[in-house]
Image (tube, coloured by chain):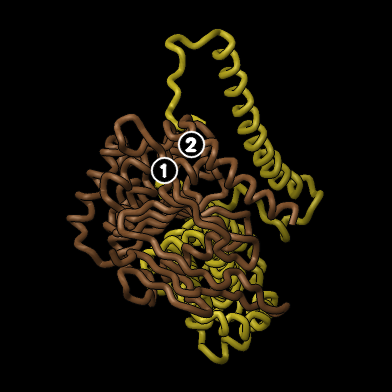
Amino acid sequence: MSKVDVAGPAAPSPQYLQWLQRERRGRMTVRGAQLALLAVFLVLWEVAPRLDLINPLFTSYPSTIWPTFLEMLEPTPQQASILTHTWFTVVATVAGFSAAMLLGTAIAAALWWWEGLYKVLDPYLVVANAMPKTAFVPLFYIWLGATFSIFGMSLAISLFITILMIYSGFQGIDPNKTKLAQTFGASKGQILMKVVLPGSVPTLIAALKVNAGLSLVGVVVGEFQSASLGLGYLIQYGSQIFKMNIVMTAITLLAIVSSLMYLAISWLESAVMRRR
Amino acid sequence: MSPKVELRNVGLRYFGLEGETEALKGISLSVAPGEFVSIIGQSGCGKSTLLSLISGILKPTEGEVLVDGAPVVGPSPKVGYMLQQDYLFEWRTILENAVLGAEIQGADMAAARERARQLLTRYGLGQFLNHLPRQLSGGMRQRVALARTLCTEPDVVLLDEPFSALDSQTRIALADEVNEILRREGKTAILVTHDIGEAVSMAERVIVLSRRPGRVKSDHAIKFTAANGSRPPPFKARSTPEFNGYFNALWQELEVHVEG
């Protein structure tokens, strides 16, 4: 079981070069197929309404998205710029999953600290997690008002799964690592800070991944109900006045926002995991 | 000379909903300063539990455990404990792993780091200080674990089958190294193992525990007459004429348990 890096032979063999080429071709094929799939989807979406196969009133066209975006960049007296809407949704989502991470980790740590507390709360946490949080949107609107109900929904939708994931990560820490710290006389706080938390970093990142997506759902659903800003609001507004181009533009922006968040978290993950 | 470690009529029972399990019963033994004692017995006889009691992470149900004449009330910097596997923290570098104990005990970190650096360098790990555990082989990792144990400068070192996770060649080589390090530094050592050869070749005394509940079944003094009068290192000890005698005697004692 040698862990020392093996240096390759000075000159790669022709077989190896062939293998490399096959690998590269395989990757290119997959990437090509992915792009082709997207292209087919966009072409169908553009052409089907024009051939009267579907009603353009319902679907708009992909070609209208960019012009609609440009048109909505300028704020009007009735409507903020589309960038302001996007920004508001992004801020609410980031606030939601950051709060869920901090609060979730703190609560999981408390449950780890007092095992009795976990035993008591366990069934409630499981039920709270299984509950469709979106059922609370109207209630949150009444309780928290227009702005805070959005943050509240974003937090509520991701908090319980965060607690459960992180707590089970804490429990998955090798008890022998804890025993090792105890042989040096570690206090409970030291075990938490030096063993349990650093050992749970992979779990924290997994929780963050789940959270970011869920928080975005919470924000958009919250905005449906109560906002006058945000992409969720734009979707609601556009569908009420039957302007599908606004709806489709907002949905496209949502897709871009969630892809960027996914990329950011993947980058964070690889940066952290390189240390392990 | 007053004993370094002493157990007086120690018993330990584990409690569970199905009932209680008596792990150790009426254990009395003492270990002199600088002595190297091996404890053998079959798996489940409470060998590891005995070490946990001496280290203070477990409290006996009956009797008392003393180190330097004072009752053990909890883990103390005087006692170092080496576990069955290295349990290095994968998120810490080798050097950071080696100073873990000092960090937990709130010791002077600059001095601890210097000590760890010296220990690791002496064990041939000088150029791996800033590597991560996964980049090291099993034997190297266990040497880091030894450095981590000795970095807090304990007088007593407890070894719980520290070589059991290694391949047999590394195991014998590392036994020689650990033996040499502990003897040179004059540490009192208690080694728990189920490997009779390891027990005999490393220790001055081998204590045999009976099956559960573990009691002291017998206590054997181990002596080798080496050419220069000093004790041969473990690997050499294995080829002395005395070795086979001790080995067979202990083997038979353990075999009786299998049949009984």
| Residue closer to the observer: A265 or B137 | B137
What color was chain B assigned in the picture?
brown
Q: Is residue B185 above or below residue A58?
A: above
Is residue A79 visible to the viewer in this orientation of the structure? no
Look at mark 1 in the image and give the residue it sits on.
Answer: B223
Whether callout 2 and callout 1 share a subunit is answered yes
Q: Secondary structure at mark 1?
A: loop
Question: Left or right: B203 with respect to A241?
Answer: left
Q: Residues within 10 Å of mark 2 (few under 14, many from 20)?
A: some
Residue B44 position within the rendered picture, expressed as x and y whole percent measured from the top left: 63, 60
- Mark with earlier residue (2, 1): 1
Please determine whether, in this image, residue A136 is positioned above or below residue A224.
Answer: below
Q: Residue at x 45, y 36 (%)?
A: B137
Local secondary structure at mark 2: helix
Q: Are marks 2 and 1 in contact (CB under 8 Å)?
A: yes
Chain of the residue where label 1 is placed in the rendered structure: B
Relative to A166, residue B140 above or below: above
Residue at the location (62% across, 86% down)?
A: A120
The hue in which chain A appears in the rendered picture of the protein: yellow
Location of mark 2 (residue):
B242
Lateral position of residue B257 relative to residue B151, left or right: right
Which residue is located at x 41 percent, y 43 percent? B223
The percent coordinates of residue B147 (x first, y second) are 33, 48
- Residue at 44% from the left image edge and 46% from the top image edge: B222
Residue B160 appears in the rendering: yes
Which amino acid, by three-letter code, is at mark 2?
Glu
Q: B35 and A245: which one is in front?
A: B35
